[in-house]
Image: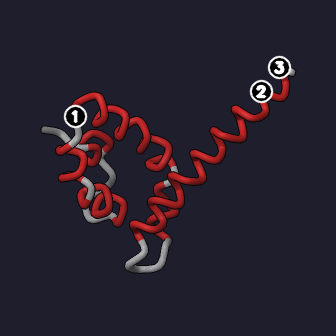
Amino acid sequence: MLTISDIYGPPEGSRLKVELDSWAYFEKALRLKDRLRFRKMNEPILQCAKTIEVSPEGFGTETYLLTFLIHQQKLIDLLEQKLKERK
């Protein structure tokens, strides 16, 4: 079974590939529907791959999670703006 790392293929040996590979067992344990959501959720993080590469050594997971949270906040802000426009 392919993992998100296999699909999006960050460079071999990159910190992002190591981080994504560390989530492989979690991803494989998910039901197919959730696995697809997990992959979709990771797409924006892959676009910000540079943040993981420049993060301090040993903080890959923290950077990965913070990047995800920042993306989620952007979505929340966008939804709030759309709701205000509807009023």
Residue nearest the observer in this picture, 57 or 80 = 80
The one nearer the camera, 34 or 5, is 34
Q: Residues within 10 Å of mark 1 (few under 14, many from 20)?
A: few
Q: Name the residue beneath numbered marker 2.
A: 83
Foreground: 73 or 57?
73
Which element type, helix, strand or loop, lies under badge 2?
Answer: helix
Looking at the image, is mark 2 or mark 1 earlier in the sequence? 1
Q: Position of residue 35 (x, y in %)?
A: 28, 36
Could you tell me which residue is drawn at 18 percent across and 39 percent down? 2
Quick check: 3 left or right of 40?
Answer: left
Can you identify the residue that label 1 sits on?
A: 31
Q: Is residue 46 left or right of residue 19?
A: right
Residue at image coords 45%, 68%: 62
Q: Quadrant of residue 59?
A: bottom left
> Relative to 85, is 10 above or below?
below
The quadrant in which the C terminus is found is top right
Q: Is residue 38 left or right of residue 51?
A: left
Q: Amino acid at mark 2?
A: Leu
Relative to 5, say whether 75 is above or below: above
- Give me the C-alpha separation between circle 2 and circle 1: 33 Å
Q: Which mark is residue 18?
A: none
Residue extending furthest bottom?
A: 57
- Quadrant of image for the N terminus: top left
Colouring: secondary structure
Vertical relation: 40 (above or below) 14: above
For disc 3, the marked residue is 86
Q: CA distance from mark 1 to mark 3?
A: 36 Å
